[in-house]
Image: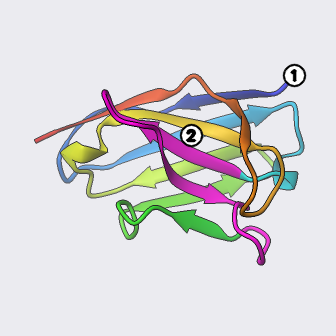
Amino acid sequence: EVQLVESGGGLVQAGGSLSLSCVASGFTFDDYAIGWFRQAPGKEREGVSCIGCKDGIKGSTYYADSVKGRFTMSRDNAKNTLYLQMNNLKPEDTALYYCAKGTGRGTSTEYDYWGQGTQVTVSS
């Protein structure tokens, strides 16, 4: 059974940092794209970052323009754990953050399993 469990969210002041974790189980971690998404109230879900979601170099990482230079995604294949280090947080980063498993790798991948999410709130 595929499971994704996020943790690490919380309340932080603007300019602060948080580190999210996503522990995955039930699949071979390195065989699939895996990504972080977020959804703020009243807004559509958006992709934040992903690994293995672009054609070409295996393990290449993608970041949304809104988080480039501030967020860093990494993974520990031995622990089946995905991380998202978020620095210089802004109020507009406030959202429910999810990790998700891709159906494969590459640009055309879709996401078929989602965690329950962890709330990040950034106060101004």
Boundaries of the magenta span: 34-59
Q: Specify the quadrant that holds the N terminus.
A: top right
Among the 4 quarters of the image, the one containing residue 79? top right
Kind of residue at disc 1: Glu
Query: Which residue is at 45% across, 53% downward?
Result: 85
Vertical placement of residue 64 versus 45, above or below: below
Toward the viewer: 80 or 102?
A: 102
Residue found farthest to the bottom: 56
Displayed quadrant of residue 3:
top right
Which image quarter is the C terminus in? Answer: top left
Secondary structure category for the residue under label 1 = loop
Q: Is residue 71 above or below residue 40?
A: below
Is 114 left, or right, of 48 in this rendering? right
Which residue has dot 1 on it? Answer: 1
Residue underneath mark 2? 21
Q: Position of residue 33 (x, y in %)?
A: 75, 53
- The residue lying toward the viewer, choosing from 77 and 93, is 93
Residue type marked 2: Ser
Residue 10: x, y in percent? Answer: 34, 30
